[in-house]
Image (cartoon, rainbow, N blue to C red):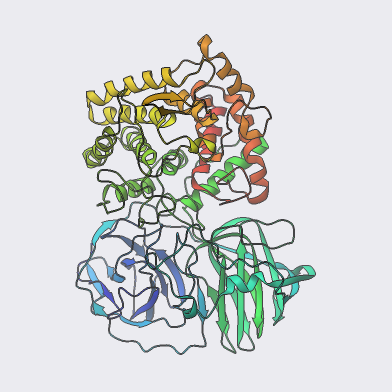
Amino acid sequence: MFISAKPIWLDGSERQQNTFVAFKTTLSGLHNFKISIAAATFYRLYINDRFVAFGPARTAKGYARVDIIDLPIIEEESTILIEVAGYYCRSLSTVRQPSFLIAEVFSGDEILAYTGRDFLCREMREKERFSERYSQQRHFGEIWDDTKPQNNWVEPAIMEDSPVFLKRSAPYPAYQDVALNQADVGTFQFDPSLPCVKNRYSFKGSEFWGAFAEEEIPYKPYRWVQVQKLSVKDHARNLPLTLSAGEYLLFDFNRIECGFLKLALESSLESDIVVAYTEYCEADTFSFTQMNAQNVVEFILNEGFSGEKMTFEPYTLRKAILFVKSGKITLRQFGIKSFTHPLENVYRPDIQDAMLQKIYDAAIRTFTHNAVDIYMDCPSRERAGWLCDSYFTGIVEHFLFNESKVEEDFLENYRLYSGDAFVPKGMLPDRYPSDNGHGGYGDCIPQWCMWYILEVRDFLLERKPDYDKELFRESVEGILNYLKDFENEDGLLESLPGWNFVEWSDANNWVEFVNYPTNFLYAEALSCGHALYGNEEWLEKSKKIRRIATEKSFDGKLFVDEAVRENGLLVNNNNTSEACQYYALLFGGIDLDQPCYSFLKEQLLNNFSAMEQEDRPFVPVNAFIGLYLRLMALLKLKYYDLLLEDVKGFFGGMVEKTKTLWEYRQQKGSYDHGFASFAAVAIWRAINRL
């Protein structure tokens, strides 16, 4: 993919944590030219101070995806500037590998410039290296200090080792400037009595994951914001506005946006400004500690600065607050440069029901935020590519665009996973590209590997039938061969190791021994394996597991979740979840119209527990994955009108607040979660009786 270019980096720092390096070259008389570019961890590309692109698409350890980008026509001398974040830390959203940049500028067959010959570099000292983690799932927070002197440009080192380069199938991101021209104005002052969360992370950080010692970190804006008492002075003031130390502006996009925070401003004095942001908070208040991420950036500006500031990384927000910590600024514009999946050719039907139309549109926005280079759970605290989530998002991409380009890259990443000490041989990590070993979540969810097989079946047999099935054989066989060792005397899976996950509810407390939802899913995975590769043993085993799991778990009214060992015998524990009913309906091969299932049918039709009814005979589902199993079950059973009413009742309030769809039914976690975009598919299929 590169003819002359070599991977380069600032000499000796490729394994240094949180190092930002800028690279530049100057060319003239350029027409119809392109740049091939890859980097670890991320790059930002400019021409003559004009933003061009952010990348690359993420992929497996030891590999790098190559972006090929059309560049603007430049008549005169042009400076190509590439800023690269060399995080070199473990995370859930990338793999840790030595930092590098490789780039080649070309026009037709002519190579105009390339790394290893034409680029100089410098460490970007203005980006504070010693900062807190933004989240444990991602990397480090952004503190930009322009008052630091810039380093000299030097010759970079050519890296001895090179990753394997891969093409990018996912479409290139869409960038759109979304500006706000009004803000609420107020004052703030330090109040030590206010509650302050020292840090807010999903799991405990450590040297293993990558962190700086507390005493090494000079700026801690996340804590600083929390102990500022706010007093509103005025509402809906128009920009530009001049602010002095002790004043703030509060902005509201009225919907969640995803992208790079962007400010146009002037600083008449040396100034320190802090911007905090949140996905949702009520009325004209501001709160931002409910998310397990430190949603704050800081800019320290020289006296006389005039221009734009934009965050390096993309973030997710509805509201933002800008504090002038010291100095004096004039803010001319505040907004987001969006970073999303492009919407050309998206399928957007006219839906007569106004609420369903709003939910459908919110599902599209949710998808575009979460499918830029891989399928992500959320575009905020994690940006991680999880299995099972991807099963639903894969359906959405093909439905909305009649293609599966992001899914192609997503699944290729998993095929290229080469194993590590934290994931059993033959199995796949629960999310990838990612580093493993973080304990709290586990690193391999057995059920997610089964969902992987379901997704691969749909991808190969329905969405991309011309794709080479043999590329996936090793991963599918590896999973099924591993699971085989945990079959008990009945052929059911029992006491699976790892983090067993069936649903975000109490259903997940009943997974220690023989978990029936897991076995229904296992039967389906075996059936899908047979459909792909014709293994008759898998098919017969699938039939047997469906039959035995159905017989043993049904108590005459409902399907119970688990059988436990008592004196060596398996005994049902009589715990019953709503989620288990949907696993049985989808994968158990039952006929709901048989008289023995009359009670279950009544509950399905009249007691959707996520809508908060009382006197439920089972533990209710949460949003993931119970709600989506219900939607799938209603489609399978052709209860279309019921599905549409459920969708309006479940998602309607979300749309009014954020115009995106959420991780949970409660107001917590992410308010912009990729799998939730499946609502668009469910709406369309139900309306069209499909």
Q: Is residue 522 left or right of residue 285?
A: left
Residue 467 figure quarter = top left
Q: Position of residue 662 (x, y in %)?
A: 57, 46
**Left or right: 538 with respect to 548?**
left
Q: Is residue 515 above or below residue 547?
A: below
Q: Is residue 570 visible?
A: yes
In the image shown, does 495 or 227 lie closer to the viewer? 495
Q: Position of residue 228 (x, y in %)?
A: 69, 73
In the rendered image, the vertical position of residue 378 relative to residue 563, given as above or below: below
Q: Is 217 located above or below residue 466 in the figure?
A: below
- Residue 352 visible from this viewpoint: no
Name the residue at 42% across, 36% down: 512
Between 302 and 548, which is closer to the camera in this rendering?
548
Closer to the camera in the image, 149 or 15: 15
| Residue placed most toward the observer, 482 or 293 | 482
Query: Residue sitting at 58 percent across and 23 percent down?
Result: 604
Residue that lies at the very extreme toward the front in this rendered image: 567
Q: Is residue 227 left or right of residue 555?
A: right
Report the quarter where the N terminus lies. Answer: bottom left
Residue 26, given in percent of the width and then of the height, sits at 34, 81
Q: Quadrant of residue 435?
A: bottom left
Residue 463 position, x and y percent, is: 36, 36
Q: Residue furthest top?
A: 595
Image label count: 0
